[in-house]
Image (cartoon, helix red, strand yellow):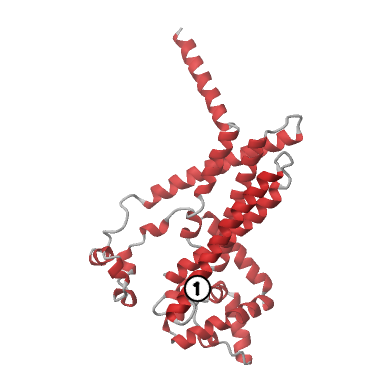
Amino acid sequence: MQRAARLIVLALLVVAVALTLAGIGATHFLRSEGRLLRSRALLATACALGVALALHFAFDTAAEAVLGTSPKRPPLLTARVIADGPGRLYLDSACPKGATFIVCAYRGRTLSADEFLWSSAGVFQTMSVEQRLRMIDEEPRFVTAVAMHYPLSVLKAAVANAVEQFVLVWPAEAWMDPGVSFSDPALSGADLFQVAPFLSLCVANLGSCVPALPEALIASSIAITLLFSFAVIAAHFVAAWRRTTGTQQGNSAYKRAIVFASLILVGLVANAGLCGAISGPHTRYQTRVVWLAVLAAGVLEAAYPIILSRFRRLFARATAVEHTSRL
């Protein structure tokens, strides 16, 4: 659990750095903006990222001081390339020829990435500590070998995972019964139940900790909201392009709103690409950030109301027609 949380933090940091670089490039073309404003924004962003990175390394240092070693990250990429197919192809080809990867001993098993890493009957959980450390140490060499032998297959799988990740936007994992998950023998005796005693009630009463609202209702509501938000963003991008190519001059506030919305879209794509390609498509990865699309649509409408003004005109016409019919 702790390792997974740290991986999520790392993924968010990478996305934040990507957005920072994209923002610097975008604001370079805003000629109406003063250099002082850009310098202050860059300084604030750099300070925030610096603090986040410092705290991350401080955690590693503190853990090494207390435990005697820094925390190890699970071999996510190893599990990913094997589950996607290219890793199995490489193992079938290289292991009989003398490859010494520890995962060669498990090349005949067909497992998903989650089963490979976390299932009590999978691979990683059944290994000794020494074997796990060896697999972690071998991961860069193994993944590099797979990518060199099957580059197109690895790229195709990564793109497919990223696309699937992009559309997984509802909190489906909220409807996973924690009573079933934590009744696993590997977790039932863990200290987690001491800090989260409510889990004992979930295990004792299966289904009691699942939300009462139907998952389909929540998923459809989120999908409709996001489709509307993306439509609003698209309408504003078209309007901004017309204002740029026409005789009208856009105001600086609207330019900033367009850049803000563009960076939000870049961030959503980067998040889907990073998490989907590395860890694998899971709803929790995109659900945590997709609400930013709604925020971007709201900022655009606040800066230059297009959709809202049209609704107002339609409402005014309907009111006028109704008033005329009464007369």
Q: In this orientation, which residue lies closer to the viewer: 51 or 126? A: 51
Q: How many marks?
A: 1
Count residues near mark 1 (Cα–Cα under 10 Å), then give few for <14, some for 14-19, many for 20+: some
Q: Position of residue 8 (x, y in %)?
A: 50, 64
Residue 180: image quadrant is: bottom left
Q: Say whether residue 260 is visible.
A: yes
Q: Position of residue 309 (x, y in %)?
A: 56, 27
Q: Residue furthest bottom?
A: 98
Q: Position of residue 291 (x, y in %)?
A: 49, 48
| Residue drawn 71% across the image and 51% down it | 25
Give the amino acid type for the residue marked by disc 1 in the picture. Asp
Q: In this orientation, which residue lies closer to the viewer: 234 or 187? A: 187
Q: In this orientation, which residue lies closer to the viewer: 297 or 40? A: 40
Q: Is residue 270 left or right of residue 4?
A: right
Against 321, residue 145 (above or below) is: below
Q: In this orientation, which residue lies closer to the viewer: 212 or 309? A: 309
Q: Say whether residue 227 is visible.
A: no
On-image quarter of the N terminus: bottom left
Q: Residue furthest top?
A: 327
| Residue drawn 30% across the image and 51% down it | 212
Q: Position of residue 35 (x, y in %)?
A: 71, 45
Against 235, residue 188 (above or below) is: below
| Residue drawn 53% across the image and 81% down it | 136
Residue 82: image quadrant is: bottom right
Q: Secondary structure at mark 1?
A: helix
Residue for badge 1: 60
| Residue drawn 38% across the image and 57% down it | 174
Q: Is residue 261 left or right of residue 192?
A: right
